Image (cartoon, helix red, strand yellow):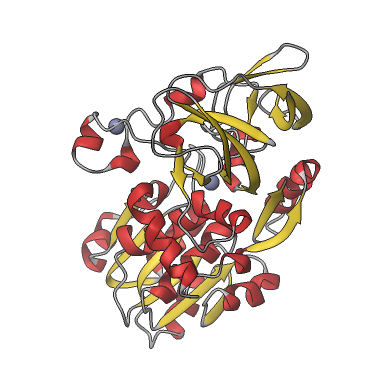
């Protein structure tokens, strides 16, 4: 039975909403009926070529749904189970996995090279970032499927798969924010808003949100921001001004642009930490002089998928949802159908809104 999907035919081309035919799940595979899928900035980056995957591809990597069938050898989920899609499964045997750094697994995106479906016209399509969530149904490796813990609404749970794991992990694992610390969050999109909530959960005393758009202040405050700064050339000075002249203990950059990474670094106190979550292009060059690196004693770190082990962290996030500390609904600024994804891309390019959620 064919299902509707958003297919990227070629880099730089508009998405096509078309029907695809999925095979029955083979050994070690699971077929999932999507309940919802978030539109992430990485989907836009894949469509315009900033990031690359084999095409044609079904994009979408932040999803949740219900298992409809399992292939041979799949034991951790069964038909009827609610699941969250994990776009970066770990192999368990590469050097990174052996160190426990599963988010750096060398094999994480190998599934994207395979063929997972065909259009009804017969064209082979790849599963974008492994999970091909912009479709009514998908067939994925069993390692891409995590059981959804009780008490989390299935549609909102989609956000756990990318934005929330990333934002939570940036705060809890990468920046290791401690109670009472001050935090600046650059970018108030889906990941930025999740980062603000994570900082609040971590007990941050002050959370300064920074975004180019003045219109996101209300969203940011709902996610836990205590201060709001509209990004400009004076952003670091403004952040020092609201933190007693010091700068923040930790900055999390969720934009991926040189100017924003540099501003985040300059916004931290001496000895402060900057975590870069945003994914930028190769032409975004960030520069530092040797003297300031010494003088400020700061650190600048990359962060992949929040440095999370999704299987370990998902139950923790679910507990925060159940306890009312993590509000997934705050992150969603519009609910759309598959047809709405191109407009959601335009909104992201224009810097508008939080997360657009495709609801099936
Ligand atoms: Zn994402
Ligand atoms: Zn591995």
Q: Classify 145 as above or below 230.
A: above
List x then y, in percent, for residue 93: 24, 29
Q: Give the residue at x 62% y 66%.
A: 329
Q: Classify 20 as above or below 77.
A: above
**Residue 196 relative to residue 332: left or right:** left
Q: Nearer the viewer, residue 248 or 37?
A: 37
Q: Nearer the viewer, residue 342 or 252?
A: 342
Q: Residue furthest top?
A: 122
Image-quadrant location for residue 123? top right
Q: Give the residue at x 80% y 41%.
A: 339
Q: Nearer the viewer, residue 187 or 247?
A: 187
List x then y, in percent, for residue 335: 74, 56
Q: Classify 153 as above or below 220.
A: above
Q: Give the residue at x 32% y 83%.
A: 180
Instruction: Determine if residue 278 is in view.
Output: yes
**Residue 105 relative to residue 294: left or right:** right
Q: Give the residue at x 59% y 55%.
A: 154
Instruction: Determine if residue 256 is in view.
Output: no
| Quarter of the figure with the N terminus | top right
Number of callouts: 0
Q: Residue furthest front?
A: 79
List x then y, in percent, for residue 197: 48, 70
Q: Nearer the viewer, residue 151 or 62?
A: 151
List x then y, in percent, for residue 209: 53, 72
**Residue 324 relative to residue 232: left or right:** left
């Amino acid at each position: 039975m064919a299902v509707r999907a958003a297919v990227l035919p070629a880099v730089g081309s508009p998405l096509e909403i078309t029907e695809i035919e999925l095979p029955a799940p083979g050994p070690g595979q699971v077929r999932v009926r999507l309940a919802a899928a978030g539109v992430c900035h990485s989907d836009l980056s894949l469509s315009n070529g900033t990031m690359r995957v084999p095409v044609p591809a079904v994009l979408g990597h932040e999803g949740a749904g219900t298992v409809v069938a399992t292939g041979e050898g799949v034991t951790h989920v069964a038909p009827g189970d609610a699941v969250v899609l994990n776009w970066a499964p770990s192999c368990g045997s590469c050097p990174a996995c052996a160190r426990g750094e599963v988010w750096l697994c060398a094999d994480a995106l190998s599934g994207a090279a395979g063929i997972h479906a065909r259009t009804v016209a017969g064209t082979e399509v790849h599963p974008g970032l492994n999970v091909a969530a912009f479709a009514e149904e998908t067939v994925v490796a069993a390692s891409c499927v995590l059981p959804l813990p009780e008490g989390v609404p299935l549609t909102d749970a989609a956000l756990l798969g990318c934005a929330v794991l990333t934002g939570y992990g940036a705060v809890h694992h990468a920046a290791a924010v401690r109670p009472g610390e001050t935090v600046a969050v650059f970018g108030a999109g889906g990941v930025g808003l999740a980062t603000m909530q994570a900082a609040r959960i971590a007990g941050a005393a002050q959370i300064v949100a920074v975004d180019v758009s003045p219109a996101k202040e209300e969203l940011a405050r709902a996610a836990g921001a205590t201060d709001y700064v509209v990004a400009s050339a004076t952003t670091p000075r403004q952040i020092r001004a609201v933190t007693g002249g010091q700068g923040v203990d930790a900055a999390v950059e969720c934009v991926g642009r040189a100017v924003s990474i540099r501003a985040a670094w300059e916004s931290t106190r001496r000895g402060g930490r900057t975590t870069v979550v945003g994914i930028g292009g190769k032409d975004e060059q960030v520069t530092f002089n040797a003297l300031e690196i010494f003088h400020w004693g700061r650190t600048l770190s990359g962060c992949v998928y929040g440095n999370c082990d999704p299987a370990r962290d998902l139950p923790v996030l679910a507990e925060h949802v159940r306890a009312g500390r993590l509000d997934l609904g705050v992150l969603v600024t519009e609910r759309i159908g598959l047809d709405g994804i191109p407009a959601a891309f335009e909104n992201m390019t224009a810097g508008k809104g939080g997360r657009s959620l495709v609801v099936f």
